[in-house]
Image (cartoon, rainbow, N blue to C red):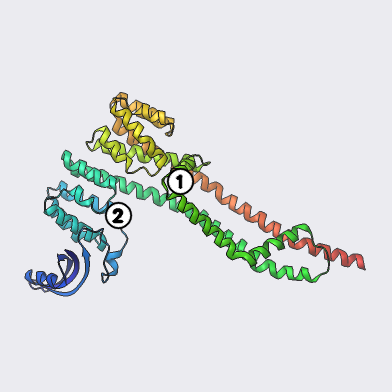
Amino acid sequence: MAVFEYKALSKATGKTVSGVIDADNAATARRKLREQDLYPTSLSGGTESGTTGAALPGAGRMSRGRVGVRDIAMMTRQLSVLLRAGMPVVEALNAMIDQTTKQRLRMVIFDVREKVNSGKGLGDSMGEHPRIFSALYVNMVRAGESSGSLEQVLVRLADILERNAKLRAQIFSTLAYPAFMGCFAFAIIVFLMTVIVPRITKLFQKQDQELPKLTKAMISVSDFIGHWWFLIIGGVLLILFIWRLWISREEGRRTWDRMKLRFPLYGGLHRKLASARFTRTLGIMLQSGLTMLPALEVVNTVIDNTHILATMDEVKAGVRRGRDLAQPLKETGLFPPMMIHMIELGQRSGELESMLVQVADTFDEDVRLTIEAIVALIEPAIIIVMGVFIGTLVLAILLPIFQMSTNIGGGH
């Protein structure tokens, strides 16, 4: 069965309507539309039902559009509102098909609706579209279905997605300016060394005199970049290829993830981000009605550091033996002491779920402030590096000029 996008004239109203319809082929799709008193004016798509919504050859350009986190968050919040209003799931999904503007997401919702209509659970239906709905999303929907609190779970999911999108946008906007400055500075340095310096050095080379060491060094670097630039680029690409090949293997990936936790500055940020993701996911899953062990299983799907993930088996084993969560986490030595202390406090007070979410909020804010502080240091650092380089370049050019003028003055 394939999904087609259509535009058609309605016999009842005479107006143009659009939507999606499933059929074995285009001819069957047109027949189905005519049976609904719709006369198709255009038909495109042919996306197989059950895929992630990627269009097959001949699909419209819009159906290949990227679905962002904000799109999924908006869809989730709208779906929760419809369900809280008492609308059945299938009817709510029908309404979502009409409200969604992203064609790829529309086709995915259409496929989810068809599967739910055939008796499948909403979470299981969404789980067949992993590129759109993450493992956390699917598991939370399943938990909401089993506990009878699907509307509340969808609201929490929308909050999580919107918060993640906001945090990501803040980080990108904070890093955009220093990244632009770094690229601009690099471009200026390359331009000076490959275009300006060779032209100036030709004047020096015509003079039959000994050049200062700084000038010789600058000329050597410029000649090397000018003659062997392809080797430099090839070497960088080769290093990147070898690195990608190394981290694609399990042992290499684990070693790299272990190293990331030890990098200055970045290691602390990465640890806090991982801790925030861990605590937020666990807290939301517990609030959704899951018990500790199934919730920890879901947490495993959102941890993107294999070194941390490898320790989760020990944590789950400890919890399975009846230990409190804080102790196994503390024994890993990977999580910040503040997080362990807050989890212990939450366990003693019986408010572990809300405490975990508070810890995640604290870490997210800490990461944002730390990044802003680092960026505030990066900007003057780039300016200082540029100043030192240009100053060195100017000095390397002026030294032989001073030397030539001295020789000319001494000759007279």
Residue 21 pos. (x, y %): 15, 65
Provide the residue designation for mark 2.
131
**Residue at the extreme top:** 348
**Residue at the extreme right:** 412
Which of pointers 1 and 2 lies earlier in the amino acid sequence? 2
Residue 373 pos. (x, y %): 51, 44
Picture layout, residue 276 above or below residue 331: below
Mark 1 residue crowding within 10 angstroms, few (<14) / some (14–19) / many (20+):
some
Which quarter of the figure is the N terminus placed in?
bottom left
Question: Image check: 404 left or right of 169?
Answer: right
Provide the residue designation for mark 1.
252
Helix, strand or loop at label 1? It is helix
Residue 120 pos. (x, y %): 14, 50
Question: Image check: 368 left or right of 392?
Answer: left
Residue at x 39%, y 50% (from the top left corner): 168
Helix, strand or loop at label 2? It is loop
Picture layout, residue 134 above or below residue 275: below
